[in-house]
Image: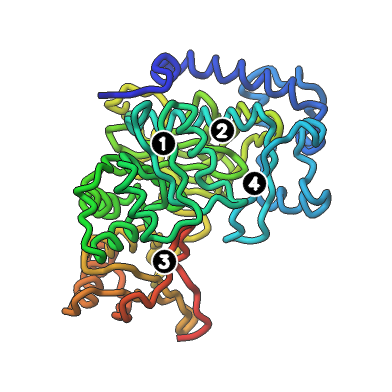
Amino acid sequence: MTRFLDRRLETQAPEALRAQQWTRVEALARAVHPANAFITRKWASVGVRRADDLRGWDDFARLPFTRKSELVEDQAAFPPFGGNLTFGLERYVRIHQTSGTTGAPIRWLDTAESWDWWLRCWGFVLSAAGLGPGDRIFFPFSFGLFVGFWAGFEGARALGALAIPGGGQDTAQRLATLETLGVTAICCTPSYALHLAQSARDRGMDPEKLRVRTTVHAGEPGAGIPSVRARIEALWGARAYDHAGMTELGAYGFECEAQAGLHVNEAEFVAEVIDPDRGTPAREGELVLSNLGRHGSPLLRYRTGDRVRMATEACPCGRTFLRLEGGLLGRVDDMLVVRGVNVFPSALEGIVRCFPAVDEFMIEVYRRHEMDEVRLLLEVAGGGNVPAQVQEAVRVQLGIRVETVAVPAQSLPRWELKARRVVRRAGA
Ligand SMILES: [Zn+2]
C-alpha cells in the first residue's frame, strides 16, 4: 500500500508543483530579506536589493550558488554562529553541528518553526517507508551535537509512532531493546544495520525472528547500493529504505515502496542538477538544493557536493517529485581515477557487498609511479579464496585491477555514524 504524508502535494502535476514552490520562495524572500545579513549580502552581489526583485524562476536562477566553504568562512568571521540568521538569537531553540568528517564542523541554529519544519520533512520520509501510528521506531544513535537522527526521532513522534531512543547503549543493550520493546522499525546508517545484525547472530539471536520489518538509512549512500540493501534486507527479514539529509539543509530525500532511487521532497525543497565545473543544468552532476521552510537559517542554491542522476520516467508510486536514479552516487570530489578509469568508492562497495563472507572492508588508495592504486582490505569470515574472487569481480565489472588482502576479523573500524572507508596512504 502506498503511503503518503500529503497525497495531493506529492502527486500534483509539475506545473502545480512549480507554482506552489514559487509561492514558498516569495514567502521565504520576504521573511529573510533584508533581516538575514548572509543572504542579503549574497543577493546584493547579483543586483537583488529587495525581496520583490525576485519576480520568477529566471531571477531565481541568477541567485549565486552557496558553497560549504562559504559557511565555514562565515562562521569563522562571525563566531560562533555565523551571519546566516534571520532573527535575534533569542528566537533559536535548537543547535546542531556537522560531524566534521570533511573539515571544520559548522554549527546550525533552528527556530521552533524551523525545527517543526524538519519534523515535517521526516514525516515524508517515514510515511513513504510505510511507517506511521502503531510503529515502534528505534534509533540506535548517540544523541549528541550531530543532528543525525535527532529530527527523525522527533519526526517519528510527530507522526504518531512510538519513538525509542537508543543513545548511551552498547550493542548488547540495543539488541535487548529491540527484543523487549517489540521494535518494528530501525533508523540508522547502513553500516550499523549490518553490524547490529551480525552482532545479533554472534550472540545466537536470529534478527529475522524479531518484529523489525522496516529499516530506514541515512548518513552513507549504502542503502541505495543494491547489494548492500539486499544484505540488510536478508539479515533482518525487513525492507530497507534509503534517505538523505544534511545538517545545514534538512531532510530532503527519501525512498518510496518502489525502492527506485531517492525522491527529492520538492514540496519543501527546490532541486537542481548542475554540471559541477560549468554550473549549468545537467541530467547527471551535482545536486543543488534550496530549502523552503527553514526561514531562521535558510540555504538557497546550495551545492551539496553529491553526485546524482535524474530519472526520466515516472515512479510507479505516483509521486511526481524528482527521482534520483541509484540514490546518491557519490561525492563529486571523491571519484578515484585508477589507470584512467573513473571509480566511485560506492561502486567498489557494491561489489564487495555481493560477498556475504566479507564482514567489513576498507579501501586504501596509494600512489605508485605517480598513479593512484587501490588496495581492498577485507575482513573475511571462514577463510577461503574470497579475496581472489573479489579481485576478479572488480576486474570484470569495473575493468580495473586492484589488490585484495584478507585482514584479521574485527581489525577494521566499525561506524555508527558516517563511515569513512576510503583512506589515502602516503606510499605503497
Ligand atoms: Zn516513488
The numbered mark at residue 254 is 1
Instruction: Tell me where residue 332 appears, x and y as whole percent.
Output: 51, 54
Horizontally, residue 187 falls left or right of residue 229, namely: right
The numbered mark at residue 104 is none
Q: Quadrant of ligand 1?
A: top left
- Decide: is 121 above or below 167: above
Horizontally, residue 258 falls left or right of residue 220, namely: left
The residue that mark 3 highlights is 414
**Residue at (51% x, 42% y) in the render:** 245
Crowding around mark 1 (Cα neighbors within 10 Å: few <14, some 14 to 19, many 20+) is: many
Q: Is residue 327 visible?
A: no
The residue that mark 4 highlights is 96
Crowding around mark 3 (Cα neighbors within 10 Å: few <14, some 14 to 19, many 20+) is: some
- Disc 2 to disc 4, how far (Cα)? 13 Å
Q: Is mark 2 within 8 Å of ligand 1?
A: no
Q: Amino acid at mark 4?
A: His
Does the CB distance between marks 1 and 3 fall below 8 Å?
no
- Decide: is 346 above or below 63: below
The mark nearer the N terminus, 4 or 3, is 4
Q: Nearer the viewer, mark 1 or mark 3?
A: 3
Q: Nearer the viewer, mark 4 or mark 1?
A: 4
Instruction: Tell me where residue 116 appears, x and y as whole percent.
Output: 59, 28
